Image (cartoon, rainbow, N blue to C red):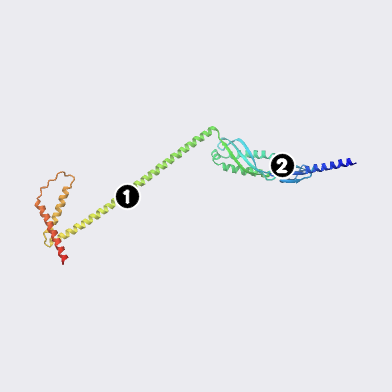
């Protein structure tokens, strides 16, 4: 009886341990487990320690709730302008609802991959090659919008889709290289022409300013020459007026002064003429001396008057 009771107790304890081991479940961080009762989904276990009913409840699917990265293999795409290119990419997605991801779709990663590849062909096939090469951000945004909307019923959030490589055929790549070289040569020619144009404009502007400054200088010089001539004419007029007054008063020396000055100016003009190398002047020296004497007498008379006026 003792041995039977001992065996019974041992069996009972063992059964209890087995039940505990079957009923206690630990969910690691970053995962969620679905619980099924007789094959039907009942609840989702978050990370931590949980107890389920052994033999009645069981763990259905162990879903990875962390963001997952899936490579999109290279595939051929025909663009809108009938260019054949090779395209590959990468998809980032995260499971938000473990129950939907486990029971709404079979093989979630493969479903997302096939959906992405199909939409890559659809989106990129509606664009020209130049747009594909220059508007990757637009392509990524359109793909993200379409795929994320399609996977929403699966409890999945597609966070990013990136096109990695777009590879055109070799002959098309060579043609694009030649086109790029021609475009760069064109830009260089335009820049050179613009530089020459700007240089000519600056040169013409400089010449214009130089002409304006030269004209202003000549105008100023002419103005000053005219002013000098005007002052000289005023001085001559004043001298002539004084000589006229002296002549009117009967002073003969004034006539000698006037004739002598004109006589000396004429001799100076003849002597400084550039067309004369040898100058012969058959002139009477006594006439010139007499004229000079007249000038001296006139000067003495003038100075005598000034002195007398000062003493008075």
Q: Is residue 53 above or below residue 299?
A: above
Labelled disc at residue 90? none
For label 1, count other residues whose C-alpha is less than 10 Å away and answer few (under 14), some (14-19) or many (20+): few
Q: Residue furthest bottom?
A: 312
Distance from the alpha carbon under mark 1 to that under mark 2: 92 Å
Q: Residue furthest front?
A: 2
Quadrant, the N terminus: top right
* SS at badge 1: helix
Q: Residue at x 16, y 66 (%)?
A: 311
* Label 1 vs label 2, nearer the camera: 2
Q: Which residue lies furthest to the right in this view?
A: 1
Q: Residue at x 48, y 36 (%)?
A: 181
Q: Residue at x 20, y 57 (%)?
A: 235
Q: In which quarter of the image is residue 87?
A: top right
Q: In this orientation, does residue 2 appear? A: yes
Q: In which quarter of the image is residue 189?
A: top left
Looking at the image, residue 130 sits to the left or right of residue 284; the answer is: right
Query: Percent from the top left, x then y, of residue 226?
Result: 25, 54
Query: Percent from the top left, x then y, of residue 97?
Result: 69, 45
Labelled disc at residue 213? 1
Please report whichever mark, 1 or 2, sits nearer to the chain's N-terminal start. 2
For label 2, count other residues whose C-alpha is less than 10 Å away and answer few (under 14), some (14-19) or many (20+): some
Looking at the image, residue 81 sits to the left or right of residue 61; the answer is: left
Residue designated by label 2: 62
Query: Percent from the top left, x then y, of residue 303?
Result: 15, 61
Query: Percent from the top left, x then y, of residue 298?
Result: 13, 59
Q: Which residue is drawn at 26% across and 54% down?
A: 224
* SS at badge 2: strand
Q: Which of 263 and 187 is in front in this view?
A: 263
């Amino acid at each position: 009886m003792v041995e039977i009771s001992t065996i019974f107790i041992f069996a009972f304890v063992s059964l209890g341990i087995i039940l505990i081991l079957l009923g206690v479940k630990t969910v690691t961080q970053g995962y969620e487990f679905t619980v099924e009762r007789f094959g039907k989904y009942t609840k989702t276990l978050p990370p931590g320690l949980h107890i389920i009913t052994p033999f009645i409840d069981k763990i259905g699917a162990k879903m990875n709730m962390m963001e997952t990265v899936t490579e999109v293999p290279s595939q051929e795409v025909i663009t809108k302008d009938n260019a054949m290119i090779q395209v590959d990419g990468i998809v980032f997605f995260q499971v938000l609802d473990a129950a939907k991801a486990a029971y709404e779709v079979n093989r979630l990663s493969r479903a997302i991959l096939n959906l992405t590849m199909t939409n890559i062909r659809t989106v990129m096939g509606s664009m020209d090659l130049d747009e594909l090469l220059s508007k990757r951000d637009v392509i990524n945004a359109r793909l993200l919008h379409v795929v994320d909307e399609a996977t929403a019923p699966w409890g999945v959030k597609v966070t990013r889709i990136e096109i990695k490589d777009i590879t055109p055929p070799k002959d098309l790549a060579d043609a694009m290289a030649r086109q790029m070289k021609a475009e760069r040569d064109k830009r260089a020619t335009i820049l050179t022409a613009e530089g020459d144009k700007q240089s000519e404009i600056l040169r013409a502007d400089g010449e214009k300013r130089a002409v304006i400054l030269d004209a202003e200088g000549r105008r100023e010089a002419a103005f000053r020459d005219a002013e000098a001539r005007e002052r000289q004419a005023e001085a001559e007029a004043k001298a002539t007026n004084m000589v006229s007054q002296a002549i009117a008063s009967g002073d003969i020396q004034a006539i000698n002064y006037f004739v002598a000055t004109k006589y000396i100016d004429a001799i100076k003009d003849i002597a400084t003429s550039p067309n004369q190398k040898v100058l012969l002047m058959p002139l009477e020296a006594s006439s010139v001396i007499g004229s000079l004497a007249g000038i001296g007498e006139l000067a003495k008379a003038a100075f005598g008057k000034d002195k007398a006026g000062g003493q008075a």
